[in-house]
């Protein structure tokens, strides 16, 4: 996680010499070169995925047999069915071709197309992880701003401390704790929140259905937000701290602006930049879902699917989910670069 | 930028309100008066297609949905009539004739011998259909149908013929399936012959089954059976405590202890189907007798294996590793719940915890202790240092390893633990032979043939070092001969005698050392479930048993007209909390908005 905090830093320091307006062509060129880089990364991911998953210990066909009584003939047949009996180079081109056609193969364990399985899971994941991200970012920025502005105040000490404690708590433990307290209920606290899945087994229709799903989201979202919001808080807090001592802030104060206004109008917009980068980078990870949270709350998302794939192990399913997650991260990182350039004139000229 | 903030905040508040308010409408109550049993499972279904499904949860659910030729009797566990109401075997044991019962599928079509013949022939002729139960038809020469009469011709006699694990499928609904390997069978309602048929399956979430009105024993007492999946056992336990589910099986001792004192929960603790044993690499070989793997040479000596057996304090393992929820094994791989087939060591043969005797055996056999207290091989070349292979992430196996290390230290043997993730574990201990001692275990069916077969020569890996399905790499003439004998013996008591001799052989030769028989640990809500009959009926198993009996006999309190029934008093509390939560959040939002207005006003000044 530290790497993400660090990654946000250099951009903040990239103060250029002047504010030269770039040509529109320059921006386009920049975007294209970034996109080119991203495409190259994606190609490398596809190649890498193929070899990494073939280097993993254990023969997938033997894994499939899982101690069941199978004759070598049956194993060969299975190998043939999965195309594992062809030379590696043929398998490679087959794999690349299939991947480009978006055919991610058939799951070993579930005997269903991986793409279908991913399709079923992506909605719930975006819903949970996306909502979690929005809440965590809002909460982090809000608390970070106030904590940074009144550096050393009781609010600062409390909110920074609390967020760091939650950041250090194991997700699994916190999830179970919340489940026991708000799901099952302890003492006078009634356990009312559902903690399994995305909807009730006898889910109602219409508007009530949205409410049903919403109630199922509360605990997983809470867990997700609690463990991650610290990073937004800390980045926001530290970049605001940097701005506080800047000359333009002093000037704004000297103009006689209220403290509140100096913060909102002058300091925050400048301090927000590193956080924006961080947020964009995290959006990429949203697709990967939150493996632990999804597993605690039986959330039918990609994280849960990835976890299942690893525990079987189901190689095609692992490959598919792995590629999807990496590609999402690459795309969002590229987007972050482009957006950052649009937001911060200093980067354009640097 | 501020607008952006405001929007985010509004969205957050909206979501929170939705979330809080939600508890009010949480889980629409099913129609009043309906009887629903909700079963928790910590495994999701791999496939709805019985030709492909291998996971335990799937085969259990399929047992509630489809009939078999015969099923274990609810009292004696001996084969009893199911879809076949009677049967005869020819004198040579090669031709079996079954009379199929006059009954109906859940869609009203008659069940005929043709359905059974189609099912078996499909598995015999379609490679993909062999996935789940291929070995069960390996010995079938031919299967033919004539009206309600089914004739199965065998290649060799097979006493376990009446415990065929293949569910009979409806030909009229399945014969159009061409690509069995990729058929997910997600078509509802299913055409079933068991007490229930499936009506809905939300993958990795739940399966809903409805009572089959055409079931030949009569419609079950409950209307609906729901199997609800949880990704982790802690959440499932929480679900049971809260009343989201009514029953859960397959618990571990720590999970079981967590629910033991709950006044609304019946903690079910009975003798189980499982034997836990140590698998000892006594010289792993392939079917052509070539050695494979890297087992320690000392373990080839039966004396060393017996010494290990004497050094294990099984009672202590039961008390401290299994928290008392098991029975020390004084027998072999068949647990005592199968009274007919269970063999128990007596007299001189019985190995009891006796480290002095273990030391004596090793001293006499020439394994001298070195200055560091560790024994060496008689030729003095190699120390008796064994590896103990266990799975990663299994606290109970970790604990077991600790105790065994202590026991073996007493007799001058060093044990080091080797943790492996499960696929690697299966490969090293079952195929490549890269182990000395490994943890193992088997859940035994009412007919023990399958577990006995896992110790046959032919189950070792093929010459290429592949395939097989051995539990011990055992290959012993006496054992092989006995196995063939029991196959042909159609007289049950006589066959049981032979099976006992086989267990005795395993006990004395010690390719495996049984350490304990774990209890079947389950739990159900006694404020919901009013009656349930275990299998066998006298203190048997529920979810952990083979067969539909408990779920055919189960009865629950009907769903009350308005919430607040039984243990699930959540609805009213939910409403209150939801309303209060909503009010608080709206008040908070109002406060923030008013502050914001004020500051805007300030700016205008």
Image (cartoon, coloured by chain):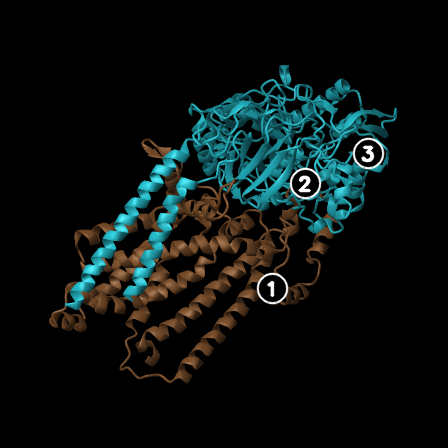
Task: Residue under label 3, please give it.
Answer: B113
Asked which secondary structure carries label 2, the reply is loop
Asked which secondary structure carries label 1, the reply is loop
Residue placed at 81% from the left, 26% from the top?
B488
Given residues B436 and A156, the one toward you in this image is A156
Residue B236, how many percent across, how many down?
Answer: 48, 36
Q: What is the chain letter for disc 2?
A: B
Q: Quadrant of residue A92?
A: bottom right
Given the current orientation, which residue lies at the most extreme top position? B347
Q: Is residue A167 left or right of residue A327?
A: left
Position of B84 relative to A285 (above/below): above
Task: Residue under label 2, please give it.
Answer: B190
Q: Which chain is cyan?
A: B
Q: What is the chain letter for disc 3?
A: B
Given residues A148 and A199, the one toward you in this image is A199
Q: Which chain is brown?
A: A
Task: Residue under label 1, please give it.
Answer: A102
Q: Quadrant of residue B228?
A: top right
Residue B247, how many percent across, how many down?
Answer: 52, 30
Q: Is residue B89 left or right of residue B583?
A: right
């Amino acid at each position: 996680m530290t790497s993400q905090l660090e990654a946000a830093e250099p951009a903040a320091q990239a103060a250029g010499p002047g504010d030269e307006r770039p040509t529109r062509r320059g921006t386009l060129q920049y975007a294209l070169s970034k996109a080119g880089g991203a495409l190259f990364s994606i190609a490398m991911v596809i190649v890498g995925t193929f070899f990494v998953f073939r280097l993993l210990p254990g023969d997938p066909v033997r894994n499939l047999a899982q101690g069941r009584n199978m004759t070598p003939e049956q194993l060969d047949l299975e190998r043939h069915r999965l195309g594992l009996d062809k030379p590696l180079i043929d398998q490679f081109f087959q794999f690349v071709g299939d991947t480009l056609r978006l055919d991610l193969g058939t799951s070993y364990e579930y005997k269903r197309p991986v793409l279908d399985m991913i399709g079923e899971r992506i909605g719930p994941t975006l819903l949970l992880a996306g909502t979690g991200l929005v809440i965590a970012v809002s909460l982090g920025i809000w608390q970070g701003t106030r904590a940074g502005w009144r550096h050393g105040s009781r609010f600062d000490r409390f909110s920074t401390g609390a967020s760091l404690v939650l950041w250090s708590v194991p997700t699994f433990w916190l999830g179970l704790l919340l489940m026991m307290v708000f799901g099952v209920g302890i003492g006078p606290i009634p356990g009312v929140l559902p903690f399994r899945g995305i909807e009730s087994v006898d889910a109602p229709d219409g508007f009530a259905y949205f409410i049903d799903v919403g109630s199922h989201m509360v605990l997983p979202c809470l867990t997700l937000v609690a463990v991650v919001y610290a990073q937004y808080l800390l980045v926001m807090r530290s970049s605001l701290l940097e701005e506080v001592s800047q000359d333009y802030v002093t000037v704004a104060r000297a103009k006689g602006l209220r403290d509140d206004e100096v913060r909102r109008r002058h300091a925050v917009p400048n301090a927000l930049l590193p956080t924006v980068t961080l947020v964009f980078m995290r959006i990429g990870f949203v697709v990967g879902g939150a493996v632990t949270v999804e597993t605690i709350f039986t959330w039918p998302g990609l994280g849960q699917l990835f976890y299942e794939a690893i525990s079987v192990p189901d190689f095609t399913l692992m490959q598919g989910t792995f590629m999807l997650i990496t590609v999402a991260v690459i795309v969002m990182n590229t987007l972050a670069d482009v957006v950052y350039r649009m937001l911060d004139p200093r980067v354009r000229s640097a | 930028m501020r607008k952006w903030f405001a929007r985010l905040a509004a969205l957050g508040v909206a979501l929170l309100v939705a979330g809080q308010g939600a508890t009010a409408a949480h889980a629409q109550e099913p129609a009043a008066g309906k009887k629903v049993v909700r079963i928790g499972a910590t495994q999701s279904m791999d496939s709805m297609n019985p030709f492909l499904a291998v996971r335990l949860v799937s085969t259990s659910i399929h047992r509630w949905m489809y009939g078999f030729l015969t099923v274990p009797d609810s009292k004696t566990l001996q084969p009893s009539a199911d879809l076949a109401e009677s049967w005869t075997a020819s004198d040579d044991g090669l031709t079996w004739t079954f009379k199929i019962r006059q009954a109906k599928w859940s869609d009203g079509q008659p069940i005929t011998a043709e359905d059974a013949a189609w099912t078996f022939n499909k598995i015999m002729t379609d490679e993909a259909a062999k996935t789940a139960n291929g070995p069960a038809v390996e010995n079938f020469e031919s299967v033919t149908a004539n009206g309600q009469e089914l004739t199965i011709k065998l290649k060799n006699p097979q006493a376990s013929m009446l415990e065929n694990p293949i569910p009979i499928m409806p030909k009229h609904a399945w014969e159009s399936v061409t690509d069995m390997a990729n058929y997910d069978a997600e078509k509802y309602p299913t055409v079933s012959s068991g007490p229930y048929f499936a009506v809905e399956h939300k993958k990795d979430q739940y399966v809903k089954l409805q009572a089959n009105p055409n079931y030949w024993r009569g419609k079950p007492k409950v209307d609906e059976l729901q199997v609800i999946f949880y990704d982790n056992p802690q959440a499932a336990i929480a679900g049971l405590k809260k009343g989201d589910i009514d029953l859960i099986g397959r618990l571990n001792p720590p999970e079981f202890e967590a629910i033991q004192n709950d006044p609304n929960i019946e903690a079910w603790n009975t003798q189980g189907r499982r034997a836990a044993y140590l698998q000892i690499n006594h010289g792993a070989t392939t079917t052509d007798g070539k050695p494979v793997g890297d087992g320690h040479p000392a373990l080839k000596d039966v004396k060393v294996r017996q010494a290990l057996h004497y050094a294990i304090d099984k009672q202590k393992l039961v008390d401290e590793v299994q928290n008392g929820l098991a029975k020390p094994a004084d027998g072999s791989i068949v647990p005592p719940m199968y009274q007919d087939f269970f063999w128990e060591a007596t007299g001189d043969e019985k190995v009891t915890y006796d480290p002095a005797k273990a030391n004596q055996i090793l001293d006499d056999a020439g394994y001298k202790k070195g200055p560091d207290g560790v024994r060496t091989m008689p030729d003095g070349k190699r120390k008796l240092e064994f590896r103990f292979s266990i799975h990663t992430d299994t606290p109970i196996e970790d604990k077991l390893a600790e105790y065994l290390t202590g026991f073996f230290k007493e007799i001058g043997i060093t044990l080091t633990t080797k943790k492996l993730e499960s696929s690697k574990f299966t490969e090293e201990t079952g195929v490549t032979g890269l182990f000395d001692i490994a943890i193992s275990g088997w859940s035994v069916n009412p007919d023990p043939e399958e577990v006995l077969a896992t110790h046959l020569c032919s189950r070792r890996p093929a010459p290429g070092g592949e395939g097989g399905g051995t539990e011990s790499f055992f290959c012993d003439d006496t054992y092989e001969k006995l196995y063939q004998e029991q196959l042909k013996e159609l007289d049950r008591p006589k066959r049981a005698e032979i099976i006992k001799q086989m267990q005795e052989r395993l006990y004395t030769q010690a390719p495996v050392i049984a350490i304990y028989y774990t209890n079947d640990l389950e739990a159900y809500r006694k404020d919901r479930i009013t009656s349930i009959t275990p299998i066998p009926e006298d203190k048997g198993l529920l979810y952990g048993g083979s067969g539909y009996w408990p779920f055919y006999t189960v009865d629950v309190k009907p769903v009350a007209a308005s919430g607040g029934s039984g243990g699930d008093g959540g609805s009213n509390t939910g409403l209150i909390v939801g309303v209060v939560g909503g009010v608080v959040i709206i008040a908070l939002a109002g406060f923030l908005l008013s502050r914001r207005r004020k500051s805007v006003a300030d700016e205008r000044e």
